[in-house]
Each structure stands twice: as structure tokens, then as C-alpha cells.
Amino acid sequence: MGNHVRMLSWWWLPVWMFALAAPVALGVSLMYHRVLTHRSAVISPLVAYPLVAIAAPAGTPVGWIGNHRHHHRVTDTPDDPHSPGEHGFWYAHAGWYLGARSVPVCILYSVAGPIRMLFDAWWRPRTGMEFAHLARDVARDPFYRWLSRPGPYAAVVVSHVLITWSLTWLLFGPWALVVLYALQVGYFVLGDAVNSWTHLHGDRPFRSDDHSGNVAWLALLTAGDGWHHNHHVFPTSIRHGLLPGQVDPSYGFCRGLQRLGLASDLREPSPEMLRARLVNPRPLRSDVRPLSPRSQRSR
Ligand SMILES: [Zn+2]
Ligand SMILES: [Zn+2]
């Protein structure tokens, strides 16, 4: 272990890891996915731009959003870039980023964490842009257009690695870097599981034509995006935890922003719309949380 100098006791390490992970999870779940891809709320640039910059290892905004909109158009068909039913689990989980079908390559890429970020800093803006034309609205925003260019993207993602690694070393010493490595592997394993695992497993309370499922443990670890079946049925809803008891941190955070005047135009299905799609609507009749007329607003 050595007698290195560290500034904080290890008791603070979980707090620090949460402080690093929470903005990444919200950046991907709330900004990349719900707000930019599906336009399910409007969020002030004061919050939106920093969250997207912190979550940039997820991919360039234009590339990520183009790919995800395409996924919704062709879900679980041969044209879906990451349908595990069509292409196999490992290709849907990690291989599609690389165009690699070799399982060992997919596994290595999945567990590379910060090394993957450094590789992606160069790789991601140059690949996976086939559906950029589906994200023209995102490209019209000067910040997201800038961040999606190879030079700025590399600078921001390399900074993410350098800042998180140097601060963690300074605060807790070199052994904490093992924990940070595991956390950064977790970002990708969990985020990619929304593409792979939830299209193979989970509950399907609504009538739908694709294979998406709700996976509660994944929802807790992805700020709510594990309610992926709900999301495919109601893609423009800011809220993914649509049924009673489905915890949805991104939605809670967005409601908090709304109270502070930093978010508006939150789109949600009404209880009637939910009931109309339920496979078995009866148990829910008295159970659906009433929504205020304001939160029912949707285009
Ligand atoms: Zn989506
Ligand atoms: Zn999906």
C-alpha cells in the first residue's frame, strides 16, 4: 500500500464515486436520451451543456442521437444496429460500436473503461455517424455541433479521463484508482445493457411489437433508463418509470429543475393513455397516480 499522502479518508470514497457517477448517468439518461433524442422536455443550457460535456464519453451528441432515433424506427428488425435478437448479445452490447463480431473483442472493449474512453476519443467522431442526418436539429445547436467534431470531442473526452484520474489520485491515493477504473467500466457495462439486456429480458406490462423489457435493477443504476419497455411504448415521455413503484431518478431530477425554473415542457402520457396500452389494465384502475393537468401537456 505504501505511505502515500492522501487528503481524504476512504470513508469519503463512495461519496466521491457517487459525485462522479451521478452527472454522467443524468447526462446520458436525461440529456442525450430523453431531452435531445426524444425532445421530452426543454432544459436550460446552464444545466444541459455541462451535463452533456461530462457525459461525452457516451459518444458525440450528433452520432449518439442519430443512432438512437434510428433504433426506435427499426427496433428489433435486421436494420436495428443493436438488436440482440437479430445480431446476438455481444454484438448488440458492444460489438456494434466497432463493427466487431468476435466475442473476446466485445468483452475486452466492454471492460476497458477509461482505456475505451481514450480509444473512443479518437474513434467515435469518425464512426457510427451513418444516421447523423436524423439529428440535424441537434447539429443546429452550436455547442452540440462543436462537441461532435473530432478535435473538440477528443479534447473533452481525454479531459474527462485526466480530470477524474488526477483528482481521485490526489484525494485518495493510487489505490483508489482501482475503484475508479471499476466505476468507469460500470458506466459502459450498464449503459450498453440498456441496448442489449433489456431487449432480451424484463417485464412487458404494455402491448408492443418489439422485444424491449423493464429491468428494475438496471433502472436503479441507469437513472431510470432500465424501464426500457415503458420507454419504447411511450418514447416521448420524460418519465420512464410510468407505473406505481417504478423509481425514476432522471424524472425526479427533471421535476426538481422544473421547480427551479430550469426545465419546462415536460411531456407525459395521461393515465388514460397508459391504461389504453396496458396488457392487463384492471389492477391499475385505482392505482395510477393522478397527474396534474400541467404535467399532462404533450404535443
Ligand atoms: Zn429512446
Ligand atoms: Zn431499445
Image: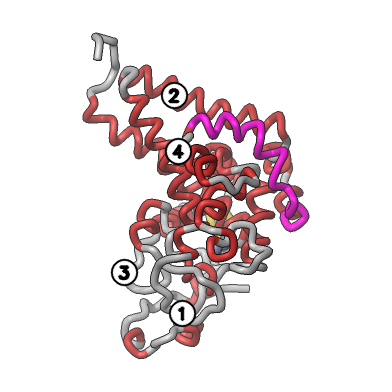
- Compared to residue 119, the image places residue 218 above or below, namely below
Q: Point out the tag, 2 or 1, that comes first from the N-terminus.
A: 2
Q: How far apart are marks 2 and 1 (CA)?
A: 43 Å
Residue underneath mark 3: 245
Query: For numbered disc 4, what is the local secondary structure?
Result: loop
Q: Residue 66 carries which label?
A: none
Q: How far apart are marks 3 and 4 (CA)?
A: 32 Å
Q: Residues within 10 Å of mark 3 (few under 14, many from 20)?
A: few
- Compared to residue 271, the image places residue 219 above or below, namely above
Q: Residue at x 55, y 55 (%)?
A: 92
Q: Point out the tag, 4 or 2, that comes first from the N-terminus.
A: 4
Query: For numbered disc 3, what is the local secondary structure?
Result: loop
Residue 225 within the magenta-colored segment of the rendering: no
- Compared to residue 7, the image places residue 248 above or below, namely below
Q: How crowded is mark 4: few (under 14 residues within 10 Å), some or many (20 or more)?
A: some
Q: Residues within 10 Å of mark 2 (few under 14, many from 20)?
A: some
Residue underneath mark 4: 111
Q: Residue at x 53, y 61 (%)?
A: 84
Q: In which quarter of the image is residue 180?
A: top left
Residue underneath mark 2: 165
Q: Residue at x 43, y 49 (%)?
A: 190
